[in-house]
Image: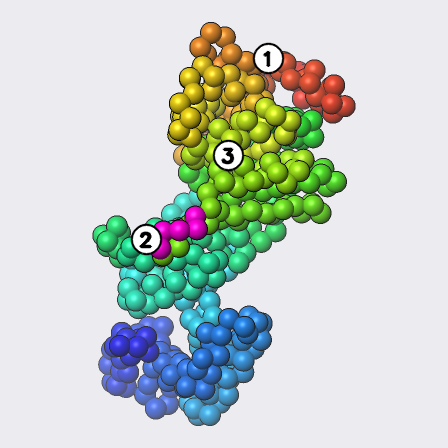
Amino acid sequence: MSLTDRLAQRYPEQDSGRGRSANAVTVSNGSSAAALRLRVHRELLDILGPQLYDNRTADAVLEQKVRDTVNDVLARDGSPLAVADSARIAAELLDEILGHGPIEPLLRDPDVTEVMVNGPDQIFVERFGRLHRVEATFVDEQHLRRVIDRIVSRVGRRVDEASPMVDARLPDGSRVNVVLPPVALDGSMLTVRKFAREALTANDLVGYGTFTPEVAQFLYACVRGRLDVVISGGTGSGKTTTLNVLSSFLPPEERIVTIEDAAELQLRQNHVLRLESRPPNIEGRGEITIRDLVRNALRMRPDRIVIGEVRDGAALDLLQAMNTGHNGSLTTVHANSPRDSVARLETMSLMAGLELPVRAIREQIASAVDLVVHQSRLRDGTRRVTQVTEVLGIEGEVVTMQDLFVFDHRAGYDADGRHQGTLRWTGLRPRLLDTLADAGVPVPPGVFEGAPW
């Protein structure tokens, strides 16, 4: 059964006497706007046919063809519609054919930061750190699957019952995760984490309260001074956004290699080489892992290596790169605290399968990582840097660390329920100040002055 037939079942034409939907636009012949949309959709498919699925046609050209055809069909239909209703029907058809169906308006909404589809009949969005359910739905499971296939095929990925999970991205860099049945018990699940169309700056994050101006100045000096920085935090805490901002501090004359599962970073420097991992094909071959890309990046004469996230044995290759002249690397890792991030790096290094002694791995971590920036998503939905921690070295079997800035969780909440706390200097002066001074990048005065917390 075709999509238009299923739409017809879901939005049947209603007689003029009863049962009209509150948002249906009634036309003179008694059919609803939904039924008119179906008729236009059918004729559009008959007229354009294979052109809608020809990858050789540029998106802008195809969009103009669809728009012109829709307007012609609406004009020939003869149904008396208001200009606004005609424009709405045309926009809905464009979203259905060229976009992402019912979630396309949500993806365009600048206030929506995440779209979560839990099966065809349930869609949630995140606005300002809070979850809200929306009225939009897909027609059925097949409708949702077509939108999913359209998304993943654009970036050369596949997803089906044999391989029911995939990470992908939208053309604007927004992160996409898909889980299909039988793994997803209640229908296909689609999660889209949107990214700002314009890359956020350090001033933006200061304005949002993610960190203070003093911390921004300190992090700028650390990146310019070629210190190795790890950004840790939980899922959805804003690690990639902060990584984007720190990456913007990299000098424009340097050769930067970025490595990601799905390309999300938005670097504006001139000399950026972007690498993206690749899953195995339908025969189980051709997989390119993050670890493969890290090893290959070392042969590309990089000045800096930026890894979107380390989650496996690639951590060991990254640590070795940091310890063999590739200073100034940046990456993120999932962890609950700076101390946990060190333990995670240790565990992931063991996943490389080289059977190294734990002490050797800890020495690698203590020598490679200079700074851990920990980010959290607070109860009010805001994303804040809650700790900036220096890695000092190793004593015995323990990697030693000291907190430089800590978020004041005791400050309470304002009348709108937003946390009033901010990052506070702990009173400890970092040892890495000498390293920065030797690199000719001194920390501005005032960052480590004044009354400590």
Is residue 274 at least partly visible in the picture?
Answer: yes
153 or 170: which is nearer to us? 153
Q: Residue at x 63, y 30 (%)?
A: 326
What kind of secondary structure does the magenta stretch mostly adopt?
loop
Image point 26% across, 50% down: which residue?
183
Does the rendering let one see residue 212?
Answer: no
Give the labeled residue for mark 1: 428
Q: Is residue 328 left or right of residue 420?
A: right
* Residue span colored magenta: 283-287
Amino acid under disc 1: Leu
Quadrant that contains the C terminus: top right
Of label 3 and label 2, which has the lower sequence position? 2
Q: Which image quadrant is residue 188 in?
A: bottom left
Locate residue 350, reporting x and y percent. 40, 26
Q: Residues within 10 Å of mark 1 (few under 14, many from 20)?
A: few
**Mark identifier at residue 332:** 3
Percent position of residue 209, x then y: 56, 35
Q: Are marks 3 and 2 in contact (CB under 8 Å)?
A: no
Which marked residue is nearer to the observer: mark 3 or mark 2? Answer: 2
Instruction: Provide the residue designation for mark 2.
Output: 163
Answer left or right for 234 relative to 388.
left
Question: Where residue 338 sits: x, y (%)?
Answer: 47, 23
- Residue 105 as seen in the image, left or right of residue 444: left
Quarter of the picture holding the N terminus:
bottom left
Q: What is the C-alpha distance between the residues marked 3 and 2?
A: 26 Å
Q: Tag 3 or tag 1, which sits nearer the N-term?
A: 3
Q: CA gap, disc 1 to disc 3?
A: 25 Å
Q: Residue at x 70, y 15 (%)?
A: 434
Residue nearest the observer in this picture, 111 or 147: 147
